[in-house]
Image: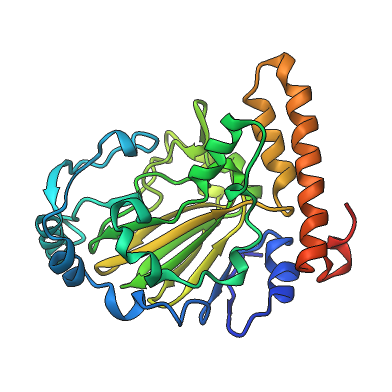
Amino acid sequence: MKFQIERRASLSYAEFARDYLYANKPVVISDAIYEWKALSRWTPEFFKREFGEIKFTLNGSSESRYQTESAAGEFTMAQFIDRVLASTHDDPAPYFRNRILHDVFPTLKEDVEPLPDYFFPNWLAESYLLKGVERLFHRGARVEIYIGGTGGTFPVMHYDGLVAHAFLAQIHGRKKFILYSPEQESYLYPRPDAANFSRITDVERPDLTQFPLFAKAEPTTFILEAGELLFIPSKWWHTTKMLTPSISISMNVVNRSNWTQLTDLICGMQRPRARLPVRGYLAIAGAWRSLRDWRRNGFAAQNEHLCSV
């Protein structure tokens, strides 16, 4: 049976944890970010007016972890916003994406507060004795901003790094999402050099001669509207297309619900002799945080199956 995205309002944390977080099931939450100032302030015109002189390069080194779009170059924010407003499906603007909000626009931090309870606990943002692991985790925990125009797309179908859950908040405009469940990975042609990226670059017009198994994949397609929050669980493949000028933010989350998958990933990145001690350390770190969260906030006690460590 084809998966259909659910839309929920007034969703308690206990319900979220039971029905979506630990079930590894996507959901759109319609009223999670209604307090954010960003919803009434962030428009393309706002960024042109307030940050028009900022200069940046698209398809630079900060985006090298993804495939590159065809449109590249240096812009001021004012020039870029003009491109966004003129963007069409036939001639889309380049995509300003995966930029750290607090680095690029530090004055806007308070516009996306408070973060919803669903974002917590987030173990990526915490301290670890293994400093290389800590640096990797901290980068994943930071809020990222995306600005694009009609017809623009994310350049690669993927699931988020660190097998993290992703929260995506649509601030302005409308964005089409295309999701594939983890069970369909054998149809999605992961790249041999980056297992969370697909070799298929255009899911709407795939080359079925090169990727014949993709014909068996069943997408879940829906539109995320301004003011809505999307939860994409660990290892759910996804890509997007903007239907209007669009502004959104994202954040990655790891906690007890996906710590085992993250531990397996990190251990696989180590030299053979280091794998056992790293696994031992991460097992202890996860168990300690699970117990702490249960004592502090009751997150793990919301339903019975969360209470067994």
Percent position of residue 117, x then y: 61, 71
Percent position of residue 286, x then y: 76, 45
In which quarter of the view is residue 218 placed?
bottom right
- Is 14 on the left-hand or right-hand side of 180? right
Residue 300 seen anywhere in this rendered image of the structure: no
User: Residue visible at 49% across and 26% down?
Assistant: 193
Given residues 219 and 68, the one toward you in this image is 68
Percent position of residue 238, x then y: 48, 53
Given residues 257 and 176, the one toward you in this image is 257
Location of the N terminus by quadrant is bottom right
- Is 135 on the left-hand or right-hand side of 80? right
- Is 242 on the left-hand or right-hand side of 115? left
- Is 174 on the left-hand or right-hand side of 208? left
Query: In this picture, is 15 found above or below 56?
Result: below
User: Residue visible at 38% across and 64% down?
Assistant: 109
In which quarter of the view is residue 248 placed?
bottom left
Given residues 69 and 303, the one toward you in this image is 303
Percent position of residue 207, x then y: 38, 40
Residue reaching furthest bottom? 10
Residue 212 seen anywhere in this rendered image of the structure: yes
How is the protein colored in the picture? rainbow
User: Residue visible at 30% across and 63% down?
Assistant: 107
Given residues 96 and 238, the one toward you in this image is 96
**Count of marks, rendered view:** 0
